[in-house]
Amino acid sequence: MAKTLAEKVWDAHVVRKGDGDGANAQPDLLFIDLHLVHEVTSPQAFEGLRLAGRKLRRPDLTIATEDHNTPTLDIDKPIADLTSRTQIQTLRNNCAEFGVRLHSLGDAEQGIVHVVGPQLGLTQPGMTVVCGDSHTSTHGAFGALAMGIGTSEVEHVMATQTLSLKPFKTMAINVEGTLRPGVTAKDIILAVIAKIGTGGGQGYVLEYRGSAIRSLSMDARMTICNMSIEAGARAGMVAPDETTYAFMEGRPHAPQGADWDAAVEYWNTLRTDDDAVFDAQVDLDADTLEPFVTWGTNPGQGVSLSESVPSPEDFGDENAKAAAERALQYMGLEAGTPMKDIRVDTVFLGSCTNSRMEDLRAAADIIRGRQKDPNVRMLVVPGSARVRLEAEAEGLDRVFKDFGAEWRFAGCSMCLGMNPDQLEVGERCASTSNRNFEGRQGKGGRTHLVSPVVAAATAIRGTLSSPSDLDPAPESAAIRTDAA
Amino acid sequence: MEKFTTHTGIGVPLRQSNVDTDQIIPAVYLKRITRTGFEDALFSAWRKDPSFILNKEPFSAGSVLVAGPDFGTGSSREHAVWALKDYGFKAVLSSRFADIFRGNSGKQGLLAAELSQDDIELIWKELENAPGTEVTVDLVSKTVVCGNIVAPFEIDDYTRWRLLEGLDDIGLTLQHEADITAYEATRPSFKPKTLPARLSSAG
């Protein structure tokens, strides 16, 4: 029978089929190839194992890092906040006790869990990947079935290396055409979420397909799959191809020699069959897409940057209307205001959505030789210590610092404001992160989700801007700082 | 896990869609390493507003939350479920739940009951017209009763069975340990392992 990519990966991991059919079907028991762990959603799971006298079944398929709660300044000093420090120390103790590989603050492989896995070559096509973090969907960019789980499930995976899962439906997101300059993967996914809504993907695994997706780099595909959860989907996937293999080859945990050949042969089978049928289809035209930005307090409340803040009256559905009213009030916005007139206080470049090399390079290319709006503060937080080192080797840190941005150490940082990187009440931020929920980046903070190049252009102009709004850079700016 | 068969308690109308997990429990409360004691964290930003529903009597003593569509969107934090439970909620009614939130609820004995939006609207009106009205959520018959309203709800059969029996997931899975071991023996050698650690040579 013809199968989709998601179904192939699913079927290859069934340890035990659930009994029964249709609505009465029991869940299948699926084997988990890789379990990523961080400090926030694991302590209660380790404690559960300890209380039940259970072992961690597969330490060799488990890896931990510190990211959510870590400071991005003074990382050589003890963490100032006591509860944060305790949580990090608890992870260290648990990893030592249960034999889990841990990349701690200060380690060259430390960083946001979803940046670290791919970077080490641990995320590979056709795998099942889980983590107690909803943005685990990121790893789907490699053609892996990757999903976020709660702490009870974290404990379940620790004890059994499996998960009980009900089959998902499948949705094809077809993106055909060519992106215009200044339009990026982030704009694709923000437009998809605006189109299908925050609940539109619920119960589905999304597969991103089409010429616009195939032409994207792995960093860009990760950006798209990362935000699948913002459309309510448990996972998002892109079929592996030569771009995937080129990214994988030579990474520390990529297969080598005969194993590489066997792996590629298998990976080549991981494509949706031509005659396979998706349960739903959504089409998006890449040719006409513009830079996209959110105006509200959920990621589905977005418009093209050239448009204006919508009016609640624009929404037919009563719940959407009420949500828009509430969002405008929280965001301090008037309906009808052009998005480009909105002034921001802070620009955040970072998070598991947009903190990889391609993101930093794209932003650096915009700001190089230009001046930051003096009223805007800009935080640049690389996704991992390795990304930070690579960026420094290219001189990107100098570009950001010369511009007046803060060059920080790796972590989740202002994406969720668990560490000191937070917005003040009423502070407005153009953020390359993934959620614009009320208070997400700090109590009372106001978030506009944007791409890295829009973030960079906004830092220059002080108002939400696309690169095409900028005056040409001075001549000298065209010369890259290769001397660095 | 405690068994859940039926529960009756004061219904709390939360007329809002997209109640995301950052609203249910902001990230600053996730630094704790315990599984209990999150009652103060529930809706902490909104509870500073005196007009918020849980700051009004008799709703502060509510145990059945009746919310708008797309409840529990966003983060995978199970703390959202712990906070609702610690506050005293036994059931949440909505026309649409985020997948991970729904899954987490099922693991913790919090009933996430999916009703039609029309029924949610009727229950909202009833609870607003007669504050303190009790709502009965019967998992055996899969119905909600509120005043004169009797509404069916959806929940998947497996979660319902586990809730009714109060079964521990890990214990259930470990009954099939032989199957797991057999599967492990078939995994190809090209699949990666985290140990021994291999590190990048480049700086």
Image: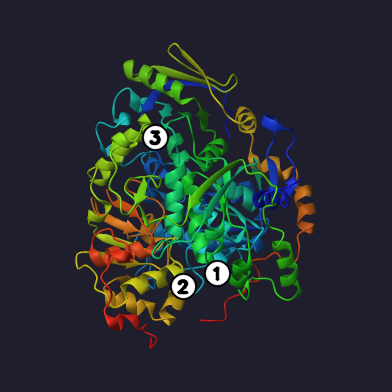
Residue A362, horizontal then vertical, whole percent: 40, 70
Q: Amino acid at mark 2?
A: Val
Helix, strand or loop at mark 3: loop
Q: Compared with residue B2, is residue A285 higher up or lower down, i.e. above or below?
A: below
Q: Residue at x 42, y 55 (%)?
A: A288
Q: Label 3 belongs to which residue? A: B17
The quarter of the image holding the C terminus of chain A is bottom left
Q: Chain of mark 2?
A: A
C-alpha span from label 3 to label 1:
37 Å
The quarter of the image holding the N terminus of chain A is top right
Same chain check for tags 2 and 1 = yes
Q: Label 1 belongs to which residue? A: A119
Residue A56, horizontal then vertical, whole percent: 65, 56
Residue A473 visible in image: yes
Residue reaching furthest bottom? A483
Q: Nearer the viewer, residue A270 or A30?
A: A270
Q: Amino acid at mark 1?
A: Gln
Crowding near the residue tagged with mark 1, few <14, some 14–19, many ≥20 C-alpha atoms within 10 Å: many
Identify the image quadrant of residue A252.
bottom right
Q: Label 2 belongs to which residue? A: A387
Same chain check for tags 3 and 1 = no
Q: Compared with residue B95, is residue A291 higher up or lower down, i.e. above or below?
A: below
In the rendered structure, the answer to whether residue A350 lies left or right of residue A35 reads left
Q: Chain of mark 3?
A: B
Residue reaching furthest top? B148
C-alpha span from label 2 to label 3:
38 Å
Helix, strand or loop at mark 2: helix
Give yes or no for contact between labels 2 and 1 (Cβ–Cβ under 8 Å).
Answer: yes
Helix, strand or loop at mark 1: helix
Instruction: Report the disc number at residue A25.
Output: none
Q: Chain of mark 1?
A: A
